Amino acid sequence: MNELKAILNSTHDGIIAVNKEGMITVFNRAAEKLFKIEANQVIGKPVEKSIPNTRLHIILKTGKEELNQEQQLNEKIRIITNRVPIFDENGNVVGAVAVFRDISEILELTEQISDLKSIRSMLEAIINSSNDAISVVDEHGKGLMINPAYTKLTGLTPEDVIGKPADVDIYEGESMHMQVLRTRKAVRGVHLKVGTKRRDVVVNVAPVIVDGELKGSVGIIHDMSEIKKLTEELENARRIIRNLEAKYTFDDIIGKSSEMMVAIETAKKAASTHATVLIRGESGTGKELFAHAIHNASDRKFHQFVRVNCAAISDNLLESELFGYEEGAFTGAKKGGKKGYFEVASGGTIFLDEIGELDLSTQAKLLRVLQEKEIVRVGGTKPIPVDVRIIAATNVDLEKAIKRGKFREDLYYRLNVLPIIIPSLRERKSDIPFLVNHLLKKLNMDYGRNIDRVSLDVLQIFLEYSWPGNVRELENVLGRSMINMRYNETIIEAHHLPPLGKGNRLLLKQEQGFDLLPGESMVSLNELVERTEKSYIEQVLKKAKGNKTKAAKWLGISVRNLYYKMEKYGLD
């Protein structure tokens, strides 16, 4: 009997037995725990009165078993029970027994599993709907999950990846999944080539850690080709915007010399009027910078700023670009015609750079715009009114061009209402230290460097050099010097500089030693330099047989600068 009692008390299932009178004969330890009742309180007592919601007394009457019945004992405990009758040898009911088990924890676990399945389905839906390629691996680096974007990017299907090593998709580079699993640290912005398509991608991978235990890693892959395409589109949009807006203000003009201050003050006065402005100066002095600043300081600053380089557009296209054209005006004309720069700039400012390069027929039409404030499209007859402020710029000696019949005198007087003369860099060498500091900051950003300054020796060289290319040449020299520097160097020294004045061998010879001829009078240094420069340019042009492009290349200057010097020295 004691053995049977020990067996009944060792089971985790609750057991209650009654005799044919319905008196409780067995009430094991598991039943005590579930009902919170001790066995000695119920043994020998009627089951119907001792145990709430029992059905054993009904089993005694019906003699029928009840299997897998759920029953709520209280708010927290729910059981599943089997109730069966006990028969004697003659088939008479002599008792009944109930065996039951607490299923509350099982139900809670079932709900948790259901919740986990729901969360998993939701996460899978999120991952599958993402435009970013995603891959997941387990703690051993075996593929667990990929999304459709991953397949589209790499060309690899789930069968190619799931259950396979994490580096199965790598064409060039190391698997970041394996690195993250080794280090337990996330990685970001790693460039790789992946998949059969060898796509350039950027990868971000993070470890999955649960309760301090590494469970795997998740990787997000960005297609760089798409990013490059968007970057190009953005740059194109910015380029269009830049063509219709002025970028610079007077704060961007660097200079404290008296010559530069006069130019700046004149430009500020020009900004407060609607008068036509003519900016004059050598190539590289910053004429366009002044044009931007004048527009941004004027009451037209919220309207278009259109830049036109008259030397960059061929003569046969320039007229249609400036004034537009009507449909059918010429072969290849757009349907419906096209607005010219003057119509686009209406309400704002048009900057005509290299105005001295206009042919005489275009000059005549420009004169009409200045006089009548209207344009006529190519192929059209109807005047179109335009409200546009004109800022012109040139490095050509317009007075000489007028004498030679290359520039209209009446247009000159219409343009030269408010002239601004920008001094060359050799005329304002006191500004060189300020310009150097400004340009170093700009070039540091462009080249990703951290150059602090130039040495005193370099500054002295800059102050002694004549700078035929002006500020543009200074920026070029600083940029080339940066390229010649080691990455840890922060001061530009003399040995970093490119050769200055390269190509002018005659001038270099004279710098080494120059003897006055017998009876020759003394002249200023500037006059001597100009004589030498003129003579050397003549020799180079003869050697190039009049080919301006070739001559400019030999001289180490731009074609535009060569034309300026030819105008200056009266060379045909």
Image (cartoon, grey):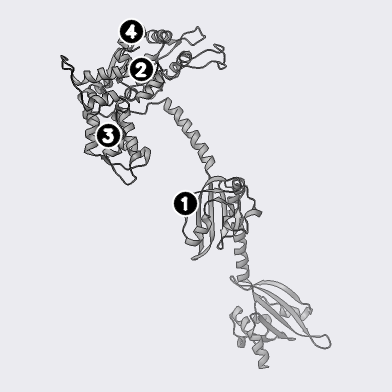
In the figure, is residue 466 to the left or right of 155?
A: left
Q: Amino acid at mark 1?
A: Arg
- Which residue lies under the disc numbered 4? 402
| Residue at disc 3, secondary structure | helix
In space, the residues marked 1 and 4 are separated at their CA atoms by: 65 Å
Quadrant holding the C terminus: top left
In space, the residues marked 2 and 3 are separated at their CA atoms by: 28 Å
Mark 2 and 4 residues: CB-CB less than 8 Å, in contact? no
Q: Position of residue 492 (x, y in %)?
A: 28, 40
Q: Amino acid at mark 4?
A: Ile
In space, the residues marked 2 and 4 are separated at their CA atoms by: 16 Å
Q: Earlier in the sequence, mark 2 or mark 3?
A: 3
- 423 over 152 or under it: above or below: above
> 29 and 176: which one is in front?
176
Please state which of the two labelled residues, at mark 2 or mark 3, is closer to the viewer.
2
| Residue at disc 4, secondary structure | helix
> 500 and 518: which one is in front?
518
| Residue at disc 2, secondary structure | helix
Mark 3 and 1 residues: CB-CB less than 8 Å, in contact? no
Q: Amino acid at mark 3?
A: Val
Q: Earlier in the sequence, mark 1 or mark 4?
A: 1
Q: Position of residue 59 (x, y in %)?
A: 75, 79
In the figure, is residue 382 to the left or right of 266?
A: right
Please state which of the two labelled residues, at mark 2 or mark 4, is closer to the viewer.
2
Q: Which mark is residue 188?
A: 1
| Residue at disc 1, secondary structure | strand
- Which residue lies under the disc numbered 3? 436
Please state which of the two labelled residues, at mark 1 or mark 4, is closer to the viewer.
4
- Which residue lies under the disc numbered 2? 563
In space, the residues marked 4 and 3 are separated at their CA atoms by: 38 Å
- Circle 3 Cα neighbour tier, 10 Å, few/some/many (<14 / 14–19 / ≥20): many
In space, the residues marked 2 and 1 are separated at their CA atoms by: 53 Å
